[in-house]
Image (cartoon, grey):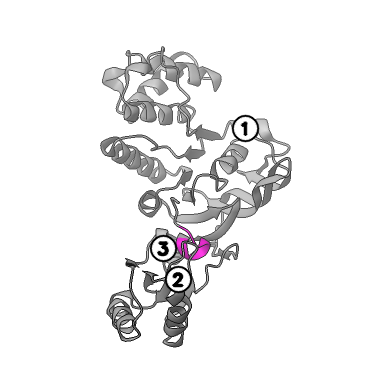
Amino acid sequence: MQAVGTTRIIREMSIEQPVIEVSNLVKRYGDRTVVAGITFSVGEGEIFGLLGPNGAGKSTTISILSTLLDFDEGTVKIAGLDLATEKEAVKGLIGLVPQDLAIYPSLSARDNLSFIGRIYGLSGRRLAGRVDEVLELAGLSDRAGEPAGNFSGGMKRRLNIGAGLMHKPRVLFLDEPTVGVDPQSRNFIFDHIEKLNEEGMAIVYTTHYMEEAERLCDRVAIMDGGRVLAIDTVPGLVGLVKGGIILLGVPGESAETARKLFQSLDMRSAMAPDGRLKIETDRVDEAVPKVIALCKERNIPILSLEMLKPDLETVFLNLTGRRLRD
């Protein structure tokens, strides 16, 4: 089966109270279009994932939704507010945790959070109480007085997330929040994202790690080249690949013969961009021995064979013809 490329497979849930509504959003830099007419909505209390490789347009989309970038076309509404005309009101409703750390290394964890809290208008006992709450949430209460520059990568990430939570936002944008952190800190971050979501916060989460999207997200939008290629729940997306994919390496002179052979046997086959034969089958475990036997019978040398069972990585490969982290 050919990769569907920019064909869109959108399965929106019926969202009675969307907190984010994005319609035909476009962002250009000169002649280069980095966000190409994307549309999606996010419900109250939903974790919505933007999954795609570096350069897919995820961070640009987050920057637009969090008021850091203007956009060229389309509409964005957050909690019913029009981002184009009510930007200042939107700012009070959202929290942003950027991919790059937005903390001051010479300030203590407490002072970093106090500074951010003042920006959002907190002061006095209200500010002090909220700082204590966020330090506890981030697991940094016992290190509150230390300069943030002394922290490990995971601790800095947790403080970075805490800064985005100081004003108790209605919507939280998390842009690749686990980049460069150790597994223990990553699990700590996951646990607290899930806790925030249980408390009703809507979260938009960008990542190029399929396992993060699979664990955290209620629905996922797969992005590539500035476009949304598919939106659905994780099981719904995985269901797009019925069974699995076999990637078969054969000599160039045998490739077309092999493709026609498997196509005739109801194994949907096409040439992948890396030169291997991509065979999509409903029962990948049963198909592998058949593929090997047929190649042996027709004297087609097998140079490599890889079996991909259905997951988001396989879905991305099927949609784009390449791997998520290529």
Q: Is residue 7 left or right of residue 219?
A: right
How many marks do you count on the picture? 3
Residue pointed to by mark 3: 314
The mark closer to the camera, 2 or 3, is 2
Residue pointed to by mark 2: 252
Mark 3 crowdedness (10 Å alpha carbons): few <14, some 14-19, many ≥20:
many
Instruction: Answer whether residue 318 is magenta in the image.
Output: yes
Q: Secondary structure at mark 1?
A: loop
The mark closer to the camera, 3 or 1, is 3
Residue pointed to by mark 1: 68
Q: Main secondary structure of the magenta part?
A: helix
Q: Amino acid at mark 2?
A: Gly
Q: Secondary structure at mark 3?
A: helix
Image coords of residue 186 (percent x, y): 32, 39
Relative height, residue 50 to residue 242 (above, below): above
Relative height, residue 54 to residue 123 (above, below): below
Q: If you read the primary sequence from the N terminus, does the residue marked by circle 2 or circle 3 appear first? A: 2
Decide which of 275, 213 is in the foreground and name it.
275
- Quick check: marks 3 and 1 in contact, CB under 8 Å? no
Q: Which residue does the image show at 33% across and 78% down from the upper left?
A: 283
Mark 2 crowdedness (10 Å alpha carbons): few <14, some 14-19, many ≥20:
few
Q: If you read the primary sequence from the N terminus, does the residue marked by circle 3 or circle 1 appear first? A: 1
Q: Amino acid at mark 1?
A: Leu
The mark closer to the camera, 1 or 2, is 2
Q: Amino acid at mark 3?
A: Thr
Image coords of residue 240 (percent x, y): 46, 69
Relative height, residue 138 to residue 195 (above, below): above
Q: Which residue does the image show at 49% across and 20% down from the upper left?
A: 116
Q: Which mark is residue 215?
A: none
Image coords of residue 193 (percent x, y): 38, 41
Q: If you read the primary sequence from the N terminus, does the residue marked by circle 1 or circle 2 appear first? A: 1
